[in-house]
Image (spheres, grey):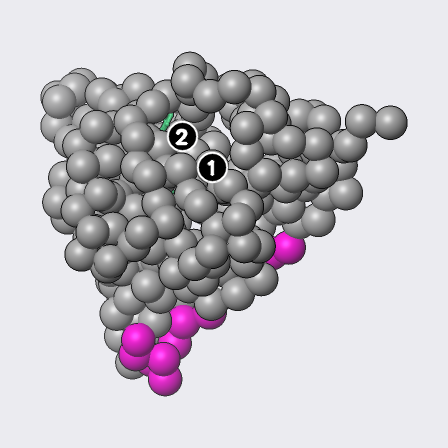
Amino acid sequence: MSDTYVHGYQPRENERLQDQAGTLVDLLHSDTAYPRGSTVLEAGCGVGAQTLTLAQRSPEARFTSVDVSAESVAEAKRRGDTAGLTNVEFRQGDIFDLPFDAESFDHVFVCFVLEHLPRPVEALTILKRLLRPGGTITVIEGDHGSAYFYPDSAAAHAAIECQVTLQREAGGNSLIGRQIYPLMAEAGLDALRVSPRMVYVDSSRPDLVDGFTKEDVHRDDRGDSRVRARGGSDRAAEVRCRCPRPHRTTEADGVFCYTFFKGVGVKRRRA
Ligand SMILES: C[S@@+](CC[C@H](N)C(=O)[O-])C[C@H]1O[C@@H](n2cnc3c(N)ncnc32)[C@H](O)[C@@H]1O
């Protein structure tokens, strides 16, 4: 997985995830809190961008945060230590091969991970098996089809289309946000609730211009290293190289909108 991860594992990508997490904290996490003593598995924690928020907001829950990338886990640990987290254990592990017994967690949290997986329903089914009956799975994903902006431009659409193509070629799906409900339903989760979370950015919100549009959308490293590695023959790489990013949307009259989708489902209790 680690060699095909479309965003890459460079320090700049780590900063992007951290900035993204900082800007989106309330939008994505305001309704997530885990009770005292509960155990939470965070699957695909990356460099810990969401972990810090989760663990700080639920200081009496105990988190196990795993990622397939040992490098990311090491960085997440470093950030957790710096933040003084005492309720998180970071471990390297692949969602498809986790060393945990069935029904060992009260809750599962997955953010910006399913978009990278060729078999997202299988991943959810595996994670559901690790949940105790009555426990929840929370999934957060974006959807590149939800991006719209002013001024509109063919170049900006081409840049987004390019990202969608690259992610599809890597086995993922950057349009997955709209599928959260059917994917979670197919995995057999109950009491499903999916809510769209729209980020709206104009120049009256300089924190979002800096923290989301510039830092997240435009500085997104997705695919750059893979594109370079595959050389100029790859069609997506060629498109990528030709695509200017939609910087214009960060200027005084620019507007950028993007929608994330958050789903929460419950593992049915035994009758
Ligand atoms: C976009 S990052 C999101 C990281 C973190 N959840 C966040 O929101 O900042 C996706 C992460 O999923 C991890 N990942 C991809 N496939 C995985 C797998 N099969 N098992 C565990 N982690 C995986 C990647 O290594 C990467 O760190």
Most common secondary structure along the magenta stretch: strand
In the displayed structure, would residue 172 be above or below residue 9?
above
- At 43% across and 34% down in the image, what residue appears? 43
Residue 183 in the image: state x and y as whole percent: 64, 31
Q: Which residue is mark 2?
A: 116
- Give residue 61's position: percent from left, percent from top: 48, 51
- Seen at 20% across and 51% down, the residue is 81
Q: Residues within 10 Å of mark 1 (few under 14, many from 20)?
A: many
Q: Is residue 200 magenta?
A: yes
How far apart, in angstroms, are the residues tagged by discs 2 and 1? 18 Å
Mark 2 neighbour class, 10 Å CA radius: few under 14, some 14 to 19, many 20 or more: many
Which residue carries the number 1 mark? 41
Q: Which numbered marker is on residue 242?
A: none
Identify which amino acid the numbered label 2 is placed on.
His
Which stretch is magenta?
195-207
Does the rendering let one see residue 164?
A: no
Judging depth in this view, the residue of 186 and 259 nearest the camera is: 186
Pinpoint residue 175: horizontal percent, then vertical percent. Answer: 50, 39
Q: Quadrant of the C terminus?
A: top right
Q: Nearer the viewer, mark 2 or mark 1?
A: 1
Q: Quadrant of residue 131?
A: top right
Q: Is residue 181 left or right of residue 98?
A: right
> Which residue extends farthest front?
37
